Amino acid sequence: MNTNDCSIIEPLLGAYLDGELPRQAAERLDMHLATCQDCRAVLGDLAETDRVLRADPIPMPTATEWAAAEWRLHARARSVFASRFVKTCALAAAAVVLLGALVWLAVLIYPSGRTPESPGGYTAQSEKTAGGDEDPLGISVGHGERF
Amino acid sequence: MNSDLDRDVQTDGAATREDAFLRDREDERLVLQFLAGRKEALGDLFRRHRNGVFRIAYRLTNNRDDALEVTQEVFMKLIEHLAGFRQGSRFFTWLYRVTVNHALDFVRRRTRLAAASLSDANVQVPAHTPDPERGAERAELSERLEAALGGLSEKHRTAVVLHGVEQLSYKEIAEITGVSTGTVMSRLFYARKRLAELLGDR
């Protein structure tokens, strides 16, 4: 960094004032400022704006105003929580209705005693083929007789 | 209720790294409690941060009533959007980002309304309506400062307010405004230089 060039030094003066410059850079600015009146003047202006900003009081809300704001906030939170609760209940109710409808549909399609695998009420494998005797392709190895 | 929560949270540069860490942890704990259904945690968060939010809103809107309205609306938004808060990020930078955006929107809306009423009624409306509560008693310093701040661009004004009023570090301002610390440094320098010129004009 050229410590004699004000155009390079000047943009760093704010960070210097705020203690945001690395130590080495700050030391170089120290050296420059010791000899440069123009940069010292800019630094003074920056410090003055900070002083004015901090000196001007902000008219803060009163305790009553804060209490009213907090009350409104809690009212809103209650309403949001309540609407979320209603939404959750509605979703749960919809899920129960859907499940009930599915069960009812299943009962209608598959009356008592029947299952999807055995529409006639029998088990999946017929008695005739249970032992592999009536294998339609004739390749059953059930008894090792018709290979 | 924890009385510690009633005091304003320190966000200024004087706070130690440990203080900042504890503050952020406590904020995160309260956010999680609120999300888990403990509504009182919202009141705790409100009391911890209301002053900082109000100060930023006041300096950006230049009006006490508007600042109070912005503060209220920011915390209202919080209820709806807290679920989107990313764990591990800092609550106050997130909250201040919402505050800055909302306050600037508020000012833009107010300016548009003033312009519309001016064209409708063809009457002179001041860009900034003086705060009636402060009225004639407003210090000259305040008037000068408010006029000077009003002469800055939104970006410069935001940087000056976050740094000068809340005394946030460059890194924190960068997090809030979504720019690099180098940009914050540049904005703050030129904003303060311009502010010094505007303050000197009067």
Image (cartoon, rainbow, N blue to C red):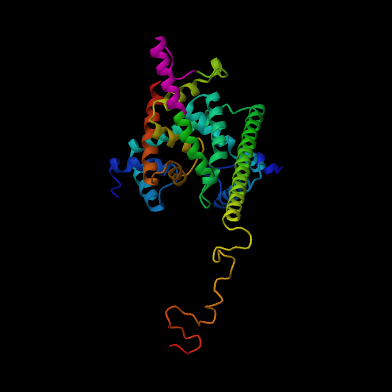
Residue in front for this viewpoint, A82 or B176: A82
Q: Is residue A57 visible?
A: no
Residue drawn at (59%, 66%) of the image = A121
Residue drawn at (51%, 38%) of the image = B166
Where is the C terminus of chain B found, in terms of image quarters? top left
The residue furthest top is: B122
Residue A13 point in image, percent of width and height: 38, 41
Residue drawn at (43%, 27%) of the image = B149
Residue A70 point in image, percent of width and height: 64, 33
Against B86, residue A44 (above or below) is: above
Q: Is residue B200 visible?
A: yes
> In the rendered structure, which segment of residues is drawn in magenta?
B106-129
Q: Quadrant of residue B153?
A: top left
The residue furthest right is: B1
Against B46, residue A131 (above or below) is: below
Where is the N terminus of chain B found, in terms of image quarters? top right
Q: Quadrant of residue B6?
A: top right
Q: Main secondary structure of the magenta part?
A: helix
Residue in front for this viewpoint, A113 or B159: A113
Q: Quadrant of residue B52?
A: top right
Residue A15 point in image, percent of width and height: 40, 43
Say whether residue B97 is left or right of residue A115: left
**Magenta-colored stretch includes residue B45:** no
Against A120, residue B83 (above or below) is: above
